[in-house]
Image: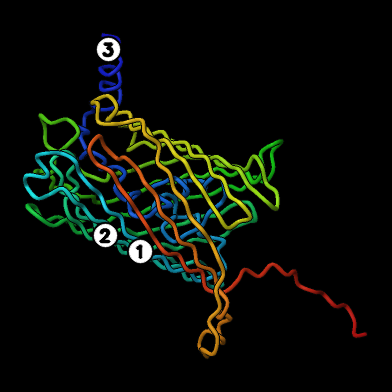
């Protein structure tokens, strides 16, 4: 009875509003399933416990990419597997998410572009099939403040065609070291300011006795904090914490722990709770886990790479696992290439000739 009472309270507080909030199961998070760093919580609204920048960071906060100095390419694939007997009987036990993104720095701003194809049509978790594009500009305003602005375009296919066109805004405050917290950051963003997918009659919602509400939700707000607890030449240990609300109609809470060895091996464990889905018993308390490895590589005797100082670059390969619903598991993998090496040599100022 106690569990039922708590569920009813959560439902009344977060899932019953004048706008009939009733998104598809995991509909608020489907962009976060596209890559291992998103799936595992390595990326967050404030950049992750160990600050991590990748083009898909703009999904959470358009400002995260503002200080990147190098061109970055990312290609990812996520397989979703359903164990539901109805999905199996209808030959819909497998879903796919394919994503490609690029980041290009310039003196004025950082441009990031992303193309995402999602097809998930399970009986218990139906996100439909969609093609989504994102374009983003970010800039470092001061040493402690980054801002970003993004544009979303989407097309929903299947039983009901639809389109989406919206904007995202975000900011990142870098506060430095605060006591035992190192590299402390606070991030905030508002996403989906415009038209989202509204023609959702054929999509399974959280509350089954009603049609699915538009998704991803209009005015999706994120706020998060992240910091390092340990930072040495050998290892780093950090943590991030995010609160998310689709315009105050629901609450999503996530916390992640990040660990790295010599800035080469990275491990992340995250737990994320969706209050509305929890109230309707659509969630399992199984944390996600992600692992990645970064290394350098050389490509010689290529004139174009030599001209751009790209002959020595970095590659990071990642994988992650998450139980996204009782019978649905996601496995993601990607390759992230950063062209060139970070310039860490300070400029030399010469006042007179020797």
What residue appears at the point 27 percent right and 56 percent down from the top-left corner? 97
Judging depth in this view, the residue of 109 and 45 nearest the camera is 45
The residue labelled by disc 1 is: 114
Q: Which residue is mark 2?
A: 132
Q: Earlier in the sequence, mark 3 or mark 2?
A: 3
Q: Residues within 10 Å of mark 3 (few under 14, many from 20)?
A: few
Judge whether 331 appears above or below 303 on screen. above
Classify 10 Å Cα crowding around label 1: few (below 14), some (14-19), many (20 and above): many
Q: Residue at x 51, y 47 (%)?
A: 267
Q: Residue furthest top?
A: 1
**Vertical position of residue 207 compared to residue 166: above or below:** above
Q: Is residue 263 left or right of residue 153?
A: right
Query: What's the distance in space between the residues labelled 3 and 2, CA to CA?
Result: 39 Å
Residues at circles 1 and 2 in contact by the CB criterion of under 8 Å: yes
Element class at badge 3: helix
| Residue 60 coordinates in the image, percent (x, y) | 41, 49
Quadrant placement of the C terminus: bottom right
- Could you say whether the residue bearing mark 1 is in a helix, strand or loop? strand
As measured in the structure, the alpha-carbon distance from the residue carrying label 1 to the one carrying label 3 is 43 Å
Question: Which residue sits at x=47%, y=41%?
Answer: 269
> Where residue 160 appears, x then y in whole percent?
8, 52
Relative depth, front residue between 273 and 23: 273
Q: Earlier in the sequence, mark 1 or mark 3?
A: 3
Q: In this figure, which residue is indicated by the disc labeled 3? A: 5
């Amino acid at each position: 009875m106690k569990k039922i009472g708590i569920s009813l309270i959560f439902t009344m507080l977060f899932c019953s509003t004048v706008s009939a909030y009733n998104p598809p199961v995991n509909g608020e998070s489907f962009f976060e399933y596209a890559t291992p760093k998103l799936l595992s919580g390595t990326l967050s609204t404030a950049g992750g416990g160990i600050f991590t920048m990748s083009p898909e960071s703009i999904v959470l906060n358009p400002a995260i990419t503002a200080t990147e100095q190098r061109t970055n390419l990312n290609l990812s694939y996520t397989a979703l597997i359903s164990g539901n007997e109805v999905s199996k009987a209808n030959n819909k036990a497998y879903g796919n998410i394919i994503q490609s993104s690029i980041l290009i720095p310039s003196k004025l701003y950082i441009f990031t572009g992303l193309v995402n194809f999602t097809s998930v049509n399970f009986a218990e978790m139906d996100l439909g099939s969609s093609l989504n594009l994102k374009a983003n500009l970010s800039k470092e305003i001061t040493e402690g403040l980054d801002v970003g602005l993004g544009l979303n375009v989407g097309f929903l296919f299947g039983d009901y065609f639809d389109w989406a066109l919206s904007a995202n805004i975000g900011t990142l405050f870098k506060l430095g070291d605060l006591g035992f917290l190192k590299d402390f950051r606070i991030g905030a963003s508002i996403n989906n300011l415009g038209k989202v997918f509204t023609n959702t009659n054929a999509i399974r919602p959280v509350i089954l006795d009603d049609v699915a509400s538009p998704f991803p939700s209009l005015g999706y707000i994120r706020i998060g904090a992240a910091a390092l607890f340990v930072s040495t030449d050998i290892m780093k240990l950090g943590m991030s914490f995010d609160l998310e609300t689709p315009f105050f109609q629901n609450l999503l809470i996530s916390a992640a722990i990040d660990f790295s060895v010599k800035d080469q091996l990275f491990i992340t464990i995250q737990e994320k709770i969706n209050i509305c889905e929890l109230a309707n018993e659509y969630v399992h308390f199984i944390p996600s886990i992600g692992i990645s490895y970064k290394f350098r590589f050389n490509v010689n005797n290529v004139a174009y790479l030599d001209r751009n100082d790209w002959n020595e670059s970095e590659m990071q390969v990642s994988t992650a696992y998450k139980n996204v619903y009782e019978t649905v598991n996601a496995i993601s993998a990607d390759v992230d290439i950063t062209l060139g090496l970070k310039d860490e040599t300070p400029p030399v100022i010469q006042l007179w000739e020797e």
